[in-house]
Amino acid sequence: MEQFVVGIDVGGQTTKIGVVDARGDVLAQSVIRSDIYGADADAYIAALAVAVKAVIAEAGKEGEIRGIGVGAPNGNYYTGQVAFAPNLAWAADKPVDFAKKLSEAMGGIPVSLTNDANAAAVGEMTYGAARGMKNFIMLTLGTGVGSGIVINGQLVYGSDGFAGELGH
């Protein structure tokens, strides 16, 4: 049976959403604003859930999504929180239980969260320019600056989930 997932890239200004198959083919995609919700994380997550459901419907994959992967600034793989992200007003001064809240809004679909640069590193290692590489550093430049570090084919999270955070 074919497997489908949703990938989400949360940025300081926009959030990109895609339904993807196991080969990395994007079946449907959309973009929403992430910078118009002020400090209201719940409003952003509610709008994100609506957009994710619409993209799943567009792809014709309702009931077939195995999980949702999210890359976000200051996303913590261990806690599922986006915390103290200076480029996200809704998470700038407090931790947001992002993975838990999005999973609940999506009817219990599992949500895995990591920092956006780590997600980019995994994507490049699996489908992109770093395919076949076991040791590399991925640098991301957007609203902020980030990096994902891969050593011996494993993403380095560090003891607190923030290894490789370069700053802004």
Image: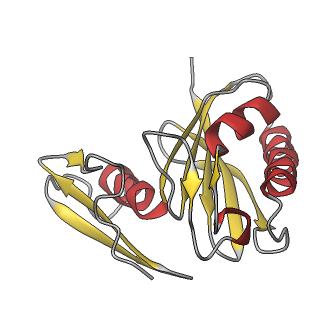
Residue at 78 percent of width and 40 percent of height:
56
Residue at 56 percent of width and 16 percent of height:
1
Q: Quadrant of residue 117?
A: bottom left
The residue closer to the viewer here, 84 or 37, is 84
The residue closer to the viewer here, 44 or 7, is 44
Please give left or right for residue 116 compared with residue 53 in the image. left
The residue closer to the viewer here, 71 or 54, is 71
Total marks in image: 0
Residue at 39 percent of width and 78 percent of height:
167
Most extreme residue toward the front, as rendered?
Answer: 93
Residue 74: x percent and y percent?
50, 61
Please give left or right for residue 35 compared with residue 122 in the image. right
Residue 145: x percent and y percent?
43, 80
What coloring was used for the rendering? secondary structure
Residue 98: x percent and y percent?
65, 45
Residue 149: x percent and y percent?
24, 60
Instruction: Identify whether 85 is placed above or below 157.
Output: below
Instruction: Identify whether 161 is placed above or below 167.
Output: above
Q: Quadrant of residue 108?
A: top right
Instruction: Identify whether 73 is placed above or below 43.
Output: below
Residue at 83 percent of width and 60 percent of height:
40
For the C terminus, which image quadrant?
bottom left
